[in-house]
Amino acid sequence: MQPRTVNLYKVDDTGKKTLIAYTTSAVDQNGSFTLSKFTLNKGDKLVIGYVTPRTNKSLTDKDTILQQAFPTEQFSNEIIVKGKQVTVTFNMNGVSDDENQDIKVEKDSSFNKDSLTLPTPTMKTGYSFKEWNTQADGKGTVVTADTIFDTDTTVYAIGEKIKLPNPTNIKAETRTDDKTKSQETIITGKATPGATVTIKDNLGNEIGTGVANDAGNFEIKTTSPLAEATKVSVEATKGGESSDAVEATVEQNNFQKGNPLIQPASPTAVTAVTIKASDGTNNSTTVTGKAAAGETVTVKDSSGNEIGTGVVGEDGTFTITTNKPIAENERIQVVVTKDDAESEPTEAVVTAKTEPTNPTEVTAKTLPDGNSDSTIVAGKGKAGEVVTVKNDAGKVIGTGKVSDDGTFSIKTDEVIEPGKQVSVITTNDGMDSIPVPVTVSGETITSIEQSAKAAVDNLTYLNNAQKQSAKDAIDSANTVDEITTAKNNAVSTDTNMKDLSEDTKLAADKTQDPYLNADLDKKQAYDKAVEEAQKLLNKETGTSVGADKDPAEVARIKQAVDDAYDALNGNSSLDDAKQKAKDAVDKNYTNLNDKQKETAAGNPAARIARVIALIGNCVK
């Protein structure tokens, strides 16, 4: 609930409050209010009182009625009346990437008096902060925390370029070779290591440049010899920072070529490594190190004999192969030369590394491994050497070590398809062997599945449903054994289908016995067995019996046909009829002669029936 009444009090030094203004209706829904018609002086102390009625209880409640009549007043913190303020704008003036900043200060006051802090800008690279100034060129009044501001003011950041230390120990000499009488002017001295040193003549023209080495020394030959007493200036620059230009006077000096003004710095980071063959034979020795670009490098053995030379590259490094291999633990010396002056030697002890043996008898085979595939790379090498396998894109796909028996076997991180290549490398002492390529052999679960399904497609006697069922079983298989089982089921089913299709009992002649005179139930059993078999043999509409689960199911259907056929009793029924007819003739028809009896007995049942009927007619 917003305050209903706002009171403004002036507070004296004893803490007594005197009401000087109030409002009861101008407090909006955001709690804002305006008080007016009173006079204040700088330094006056004020507090604001807030009176808020309470309506959170029933008005029948005695306490609430009292609170409504006499609500509690709450007071703000003490407020000190300030004088009129002015704005000080701090302009970064291009020497800082900070944003310009406005700060309010009391009129006729300073930052120190108002307990404010004067900003310190973050300067751009190569600059340091000098001061705030009322003019952008730094020629106005310097602004400090004690500066009094009586109006809105803009002040500017003034920066100074950071300077490198000035070059020292500068010496400028025009040297005359007392043999050839040729001249050259050399400027030497010390500066910040890595700094570019520029030489200018007395007219400001550049006449030579160079770089101070790691020790800070520089030696620069001018573009042409200078006369004695000529003035030159020397300035160093690095990382956007510059030194002051230091003046030097050219002196004259006679010398024999080979006596330069300063000796080259000794080479650093010198190493000497002898590479041994896998059989222990020393093959070659390589010496590396650092020195000034362009200097000549000489390698000497422990007896002082020169065994290799070279030149320092532009990157300040050198690599030299000696003219003979140096034994492990032997000492060598390396010196650099410039203008025929030789540095102090740097000594190094020869270390040795042994080349790896090339891997041999390497094979790579991809085979199913459970329900997935894996590629195994195997071969021979030297015990303890690291073996790395890479795919045809050069990616590392497996690592291992040669075991104590000189063999290795590595399962790669990824399966490689048969027919693709991998390469095998052995490593020893940080050196790699020649990569040995090998083509991956073997087969994958996918290729085995494809081969099995192709075999099913080539089976002759399966109907379409049986083939599809067999291929579905192959697709559902998770292991090679399951694939093989599914294929073998299809092959066995095909054999049984062949036997069924070639079964002679499948097509009995129904106009003759044993079918013709067989009992009706036996005929029906046979017809049903044949119907089931014919349905199965139909390529287009036949069911998938046997191909996906039990090949013997087809054999059982064939056996049902054979059993039904063998149960047909047409022949035995005929023999019974003949015997009964003969007995009837012998018993009832004594008037027939033997020839007639024999004829009647030897005829089929139908004829016997006709004979009996004929005899009956005769007897009548």
Image (cartoon, grey):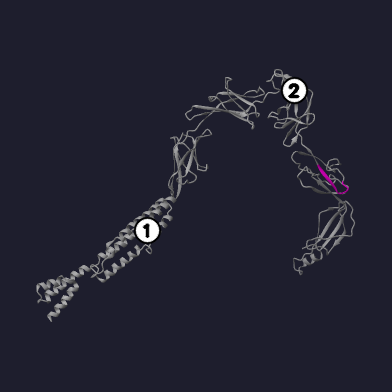
Between label 1 and label 2, give the one nearer the viewer. Answer: 2
Left or right: 319 with respect to 211? left
The quadrant the N terminus occupies is bottom right
Alpha carbon separation for disc pair 1 and 2 = 105 Å
Q: Position of residue 244 (x, y in %)?
A: 78, 32
Answer above or below: position of 213 versus 439: above
Q: Secondary structure at mark 1?
A: loop
How many labels were placed on the picture? 2
Q: Position of residue 124 (x, y in %)?
A: 75, 41
The quadrant the C terminus occupies is bottom left
Q: Badge 2: how crowded within 10 Å, few (<14), some, or many (20+)?
A: many
Q: Secondary structure at mark 2?
A: strand
Residue 155 in magenta stretch:
yes
> In the rendering, which numbered label is found on residue 289?
none
Residue at (16%, 75%) from the top-left corner? 611
Magenta stretch in the rendered image: 149-157
The residue lying toward the viewer, choosing from 172 and 238, is: 172
Q: Position of residue 246 (x, y in %)?
A: 78, 29
Left or right: 362 with respect to 130? left
Answer above or below: position of 248 versus 388: above
Amino acid type shown at disc 1? Ala
Amino acid type shown at disc 2? Thr
Residue that badge 1 annotates: 547
Q: Position of residue 478 (x, y in %)?
A: 43, 53
Residue that badge 2 annotates: 174
Answer above or below: position of 402 versus 567: above
Residue sitting farthest toward the top: 179
Answer above or below: position of 564 versus 262: below
